[in-house]
Image (spheres, rainbow, N blue to C red):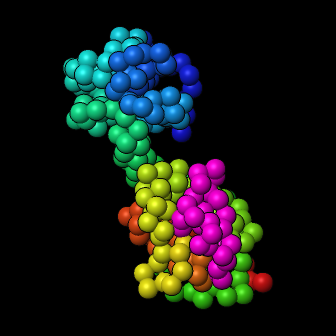
Amino acid sequence: MSFGKESVNINSAITIEHIMPQNSNNIEWQKEIGRDYYEVYNKYLHTLGNLTLTGFNSELSDKNFNDKKALLLTNSKFAYLNSNIVNKKTWNEKTIVERAQQLAQKLIKEFRLPTILAEVAMNTNKENKHTVFDGTNFTNTKPASFIFLSEKIDVSSYREMLLKICEMFYSLDTVKMCGLAHSNYSLKKASKFSLSYDQEILRTPLEIFDSGIFVETNLNSNSAIRLIRGLIDEFDLSYDDLIFYTLNK
């Protein structure tokens, strides 16, 4: 989630500020982030994990991380937003991704209305509405659409549905998905791998974005749903966070 390249003045007392600053030539911040500074800068500068609200206008600017934390501690208006900044010893890719996930979960919890509106708009027969744990046999069905974390996506196959959901998992927690791929993830008691950086160990791999992570898509409908359910478990989400709709073939 990106919010643009400039600090945005909401009103005279509230400003959206970057923690890692917009000045890419800041030597102190290059040391703070580490050897992958420019990669992290280009990838995360304008994303949710690196942004906060303050009342300082441009006072934070290019200050080093410790000075920024000291200023944020004096601003009680946005204590929740800033608490997972000021309690960090360093600011780098790992802490930015962790904070983005924490804020995303908070937003998902607080704003459920889009899910309800999307379901109403779909006007879909309730008999075709499913979760991944409702015990349905999906043989001779095909998915029409799904709602995952309040976002509605139209699909035409279980392969497409699996890939789209994997992409959403990757966006939600890149570090987690990378870890699963590094371990050549497979479902419990499964004899074949499901996620990996090594596409050679998969039968029909599809790449998740341009991440180098591949997901096995040579799966029947029920196996695809089992894999999605396994990933939901890995991310500690609720089965109710995914609702999907099927049509009979």
Q: Quadrant of residue 234?
A: bottom left
**Is 36 covered by the magenta stretch?**
no
Q: In this view, does 196 lie above or below 43?
A: below
Q: In which quarter of the image is the N terminus?
A: top right
Report the label total: 0
Residue 175, position as x, y percentages in the image? 43, 51
Mark yes or no: residue 58 visible. yes
Q: What residue do we see at 51% from left, 84% from top? A: 191
Q: In which quarter of the image is the C terminus?
A: bottom right
Residue 46, position as x, y percentages in the image? 51, 30
The answer to whether 98 appears left or right of 202 in the picture is left
Which residue is more in the foreground, 78 or 48?
48
The answer to whether 13 appears left or right of 68 in the picture is right
Residue 70, position as x, y percentages in the image? 22, 20
Q: Is residue 194 above or below residue 209?
A: below
**Is 197 covered by the magenta stretch?**
yes
Mark yes or no: residue 132 visible. no
Q: What residue do we see at 35% from left, 18% from top? A: 28
Specify start and end residues of the magenta stretch as a single range.
Answer: 195-221
Q: In this view, does 37 lie above or below 236?
A: above
Residue 69, position as x, y percentages in the image? 26, 24
Q: What residue do we see at 71% from left, 83% from top? A: 141
Q: Quadrant of residue 27?
A: top left
Q: What residue do we see at 47% from left, 56% from top? A: 178
Which residue is more in the foreground, 215 or 119?
215
Residue at the right extreme of this rendering: 249
Which residue is more in the foreground, 238 or 13?
238
Q: Quadrant of residue 88?
A: top left
